[in-house]
């Protein structure tokens, strides 16, 4: 969908290719391009794949979009684990559709990253070798059926909160991919909440399963928004470039404010003794919440969470098992090309 020639001008790459620094005239040209780029972002216009962009902007997008794509693909694993054990046909059909959607989101996002001049195989290699990150949340295990509902409610809920502003991000192909993804994510969140409401109307054991799942997923969901603003290395540039519209901490707060009333309606408690409504914060007040365990976050992001090894091993295995499909698709495309050439 986004395929294009890889001819994006880039000062750093041009320098490297030439083996020397830019001339004064080239530097002046780039300064003029940069001023036009900044003005465009300030006017709220989209930057498109073939437009000039600062190298840092391109790199930030490649990093974020590819990590996002990896998160979608790795995110299929904890839920996929429950497809064969869904309690009813209806729930199985919903879960199958949801997991398939996540695969589709990964594809839109890899395609959006490719418009920035990177090869998908290199992105996938970076995931498989452990060089590239994916969301910390998918390194936690899914232990009971209520986990599937809680992933929909909290994990997709946090994802939507973070992703709605990305629909207005300055890079056109990413923003457009996010619009479609957010529509599907909102169905994902609702099915999760519906699943939990159903369980909460069931037996005492079912209600206990929901509470247990919420207790395990609440804090990791808050970590999905990333480090505190003061520790966020990329936020300054990302906000300046119109990639990030709302900061990590502000989005986390919006998520807590939206979720606490939903927890009440559900009839469960959130595992935070410091959670209380503070009328004096802001115009309408906010829910204060306790301290996030950042050492756990760092541990998981650095590859030492409960499921990091298992998730990567499963991804590598799936990639190897799928080699014949890629080979067959390439052989088919080559056959088509030959037929087209003969017919022409
Ligand atoms: N997990 O400077 P910061 C989904 C890293 S999937 C791991 O604030 P940034 C779904 C960060 O990458 C949802 N790493 O970074 C799928 C950076 O490291 P590097 C995925 C994290 O980029 C299936 C470092 O910490 N959503 O919806 O400005 C089923 C410093 O952070 C995390 C997205 O990817 C984390 N939680 O802000 C169900 C959304 N947080 O790269 C659901 C797009 C931070 O320098 N991404 N790091 O090595 C974003 O919006 C931003 O990248 C983030 C982080 C807000 C996540």
Image (cartoon, helix red, strand yellow):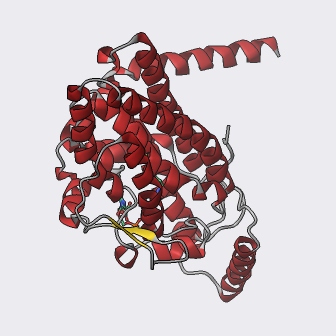
Quadrant where ligand 1 appears? bottom left
* One can see residue 78 in this view: no
Where is residue 102 shown, x and y percent of the image? 47, 34
Where is residue 159 shown, x and y percent of the image? 46, 49
Where is residue 112 shown, x and y percent of the image? 59, 47
Q: What residue occupies the far bottom of the structure in this picture?
A: 24
Total numbered labels: 0
Q: Residue at x 61, y 19 (%)?
A: 333
**Which quadrant would the C terminus be assigned to in this image?**
top right
In the displayed structure, 191 sits above or below 63; it is above
Decide which of 248, 302 is in the foreground and name it: 248
Decide which of 142, 206 is in the foreground and name it: 206
Where is residue 29 shown, x and y percent of the image? 73, 81
Decide which of 128, 153 is in the foreground and name it: 153
Q: Residue at x 42, y 11 (%)?
A: 89
Decide which of 338, 134 is in the foreground and name it: 134
In the displayed structure, 237 sits above or below 313; it is below
**Which quadrant would the N terminus be assigned to in this image?**
top right
In the displayed structure, 342 sits above or below 122; it is above
* One can see residue 266 in this view: yes
| Side of 295 relative to 227 (left or right) | left
């Amino acid at each position: 969908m986004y395929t294009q020639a890889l001819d994006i001008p880039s000062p750093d790459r041009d320098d490297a290719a030439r083996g020397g620094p830019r001339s004064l005239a080239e530097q002046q040209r780039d300064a003029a391009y940069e001023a036009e780029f900044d003005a465009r972002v300030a006017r709220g216009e989209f930057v498109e794949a073939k437009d000039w962009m600062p190298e840092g902007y391109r790199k930030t997008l490649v990093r974020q979009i590819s990590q996002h794509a990896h998160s979608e693909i790795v995110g299929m694993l904890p839920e996929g684990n429950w497809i064969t054990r869904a309690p009813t046909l209806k729930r199985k059909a919903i879960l199958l559709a949801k997991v398939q959607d996540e695969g589709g989101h990964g594809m839109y996002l890899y395609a959006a990253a490719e418009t920035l001049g990177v090869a998908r195989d290199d992105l996938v290699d970076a995931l498989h070798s452990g060089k590239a990150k994916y969301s910390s949340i998918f390194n936690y295990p899914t232990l009971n059926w209520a986990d599937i509902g809680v992933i929909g409610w909290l994990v997709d809920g946090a994802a939507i909160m973070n992703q709605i502003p990305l629909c207005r991000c300055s890079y056109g192909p990413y923003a457009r991919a996010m619009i479609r993804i957010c529509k599907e994510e909102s169905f994902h969140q609702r099915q999760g909440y519906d699943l939990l409401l159903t369980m909460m109307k069931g037996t005492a054991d079912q209600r206990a399963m929901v509470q247990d799942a919420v207790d395990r997923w609440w804090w990791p969901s808050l970590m999905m928004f990333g480090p505190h603003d003061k520790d966020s290395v990329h936020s300054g540039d990302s906000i300046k470039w119109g990639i990030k519209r709302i900061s990590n901490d502000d989005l986390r707060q919006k998520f807590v404010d939206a979720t606490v009333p939903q927890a009440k309606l559900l009839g469960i408690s959130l595992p935070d003794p410091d959670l209380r409504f503070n009328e004096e914060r802001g115009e309408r007040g906010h829910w204060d919440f306790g301290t996030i365990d950042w050492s756990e976050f760092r541990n998981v992001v650095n590859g030492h969470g409960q499921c990091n090894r298992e998730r990567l091993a499963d991804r590598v295995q799936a990639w190897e098992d799928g080699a014949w499909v890629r080979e067959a698709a390439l052989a088919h495309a080559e056959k088509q090309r030959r037929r087209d050439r003969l017919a022409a």
